[in-house]
Amino acid sequence: MATPTFPRWATPVARISLAVLLFVPVAVPGLMMAWVRTGWSTGEGRAPVQPVDFDHRLHAGDFRIDCRYCHATAETGASAGVPPSEICVPCHDSAWLNGPKFAQVRRSLATDRPIPWRRVNLLPDFVYFDHAAHTRHGIGCVSCHGRVDRMARVAQAAPLTMGWCLDCHQHPQRHLRPRREVTNMRWQPPASAAEAAALRRELARRYHVESPTSCVTCHR
């Protein structure tokens, strides 16, 4: 009887090896594509601890302070801007200004150094986003940032993926509102679907809203 060329265990090992070789090239890219869409990768839901305990529910919610009071360049520049320390002073009396929660603000004013706010919405360096281009065309803050007036600590409310951005660029009318309402977190379109659609068509015409989907729109 002839001696077998390979041992008995060689056949199942070969089959398993072939299965792995076929599975890995498909599974690894698939897992990577799934991972980049999770909150761990996109940052959706991430709420970094800030150096000053600033409660947006109180300021933007109860007191209804306009977003532009702190983020002054949201309508004029690419960046919405972070509030300078001086802007906190007029709103508070001496008891608040001398209290423990204002220690970081006092330090910033004394040293003439800005408060080290931590960025909430992170975009890759190769992505260009212009706040003014959106607010001038009637895109409200809530469309990207969510109901900030309900957040004690601001969190990233959207995935900010390319697919998410493209969906808005392809159907911008769904997010349009009058320019005077861009910072109004409570604004709602007319209850009637027909009236809401008519309003958005009119706003798109008035604000010359287009649907830019070219790569150079966001990648320059």
Image (cartoon, helix red, strand yellow):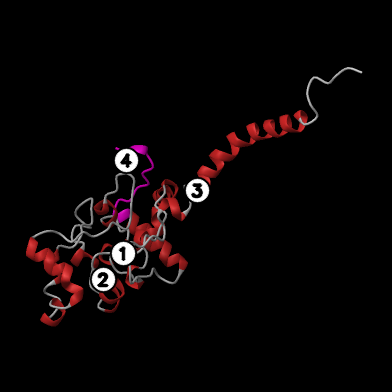
Q: Earlier in the sequence, mark 2 or mark 3?
A: 3
Q: Earlier in the sequence, mark 1 or mark 3?
A: 3
Calculate the distance from the C-alpha at mark 4 to the C-alpha at mark 1: 26 Å
Percent position of residue 112, x then y: 8, 60
Residue 53: which disc?
Answer: 2
Q: Quadrant of the C terminus?
A: top left
The residue singled out by tag 4 in the image is: 126
The residue singled out by tag 3 in the image is: 35
Does the residue at mark 3 contact the one at mark 4 (Cβ under 8 Å)?
Answer: no
Q: Amino acid at mark 1?
A: Val
Calculate the distance from the C-alpha at mark 2 to the C-alpha at mark 1: 8 Å
Nearer to the camera, 118 or 156: 118
Residue shown at the point (23%, 53%) measured from the top left: 79
194 left or right, relative to 26: left
The local secondary structure at tag 4 comes to: loop
Q: Earlier in the sequence, mark 4 or mark 2?
A: 2
Percent position of residue 61, x then y: 30, 75
User: The magenta stretch spans which residues?
Assistant: 205-220
